[in-house]
Image (spheres, grey):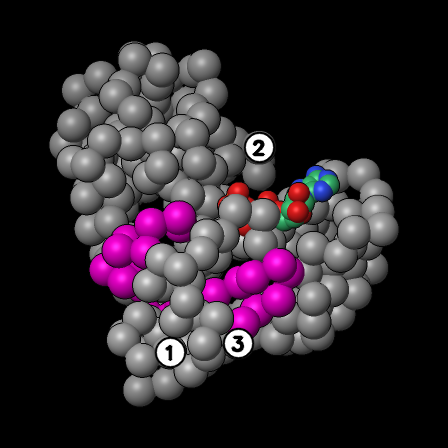
Amino acid sequence: MVNPIAISVKKLDLYYGEKQALKNIDMNIEERTVTALIGPSGCGKSTFLRTINRMNDLIPNVRIEGEILINETDIYSDDVDVEMLRKRVGMVFQSPNPFPKSIYDNVAYGPRIHGLSNKKKLDEIVERSLRGAALWDEVKDRLKDRATGLSGGQQQRLCIARALAVEPDILLMDEPTSALDPISTLKIEELVQELKKNYTIVIVTHNMQQAARISDKTAFFLNGDLIEYNDTDKLFSNPDHQQTEDYITGRFG
Ligand SMILES: Nc1ncnc2c1ncn2[C@@H]1O[C@H](COP(=O)(O)OP(=O)(O)OP(=O)(O)O)[C@@H](O)[C@H]1O
């Protein structure tokens, strides 16, 4: 079954000053799928991920050419409201980064800055988001405790709950398990499988086994080029390109 396209990337180039970090990237990402971005350090995975919610806008001297269409709108056109874009395209980072606030306030943060103050509605959103991030049962009796007292794995699921609270369509994850122990990693991987029923997920990972376990499609980057974008099973068992083969068999990277 082919899902509708959630993100359509067309001839995307990105430069940091003179240096080109993404070269002519074309990619269609389907709704409600998990796409893994893999490749050696410095190949452009995180840069590419950040283009999808314009996080690179915050970096000086970045120049972007080409298009990224989300819901048929080019997110780089002048009239795009970047705050609204980031509401629809949430992001989870490598190290869990909860705010130094309570568990409740972390999750309620996004809805509050978007103007919601009704306590009952906020309570509902906090519960729904924490359930969605598979954290509710562990924290429901201590919502007023500081988030920084949670374990690393719980903090990362809290960050996922915080992202879910503003009801995004797309979730970007930049190596979300690299700072976590194996059990917390497994929980996040299971959660990703659950979340893809409702969200489109793009995840950067250094762990090829993780990409193979959790993604539907895998994109292999090398020196800013998208070398291969294929069904995950195909890419890891019978890739179309020699460079992919060399990378997944450990010949470089
Ligand atoms: N803020 C920046 N300013 C200048 N160059 C940058 C910046 N961020 C990344 N780069 C360069 O762009 C290239 C791609 O970096 P990027 O972080 O996207 O790679 P990556 O594949 O995510 O690497 P890693 O796996 O190590 O995180 C690298 O050459 C990097 O040095």
Q: Is residue 35 placed above or below 162 in the rendered structure?
A: below
Disc 2 crowd rating (10 Å Cα; few below 14, some 14-19, many 20+) is: few
Disc 3/disc 2 C-alpha distance (Å): 32 Å
Residue under the image location 28 percent in, 53 percent down: 210
Disc on the earlier residue, 3 or 2 = 3
The answer to whether residue 39 is visible is yes
Residue type at mark 2 is Ile
The answer to whether residue 90 is visible is no
Disc 3 crowd rating (10 Å Cα; few below 14, some 14-19, many 20+) is: some
Residue located beneath label 2 in the image:
113
Residue located beneath label 1 in the image:
239
Residue under the image location 84 percent in, 47 percent down: 17
Disc on the earlier residue, 2 or 1 = 2
Mark 2 lies on a secondary structure that is helix
Disc 1/disc 3 C-alpha distance (Å): 19 Å
| Disc 3 and disc 2 in contact, CB within 8 angstroms | no
Count of picture labels: 3
Q: Is residue 201 left or right of residue 140?
A: right
Q: Is residue 30 magenta?
A: no
Residue type at mark 1 is Pro
Residue located beneath label 3 in the image:
28
Q: Report which quarter residue 222 is drawn in.
A: bottom right
Q: Is residue 98 placed above or below 94 in the rendered structure?
A: above
Residue 33 is situated, as x and y percent measured from the top left of the image, at 36, 68
110 and 223: which is toward the camera:
223
Disc 1 crowd rating (10 Å Cα; few below 14, some 14-19, many 20+) is: some
Residue at the bottom extreme? Answer: 1
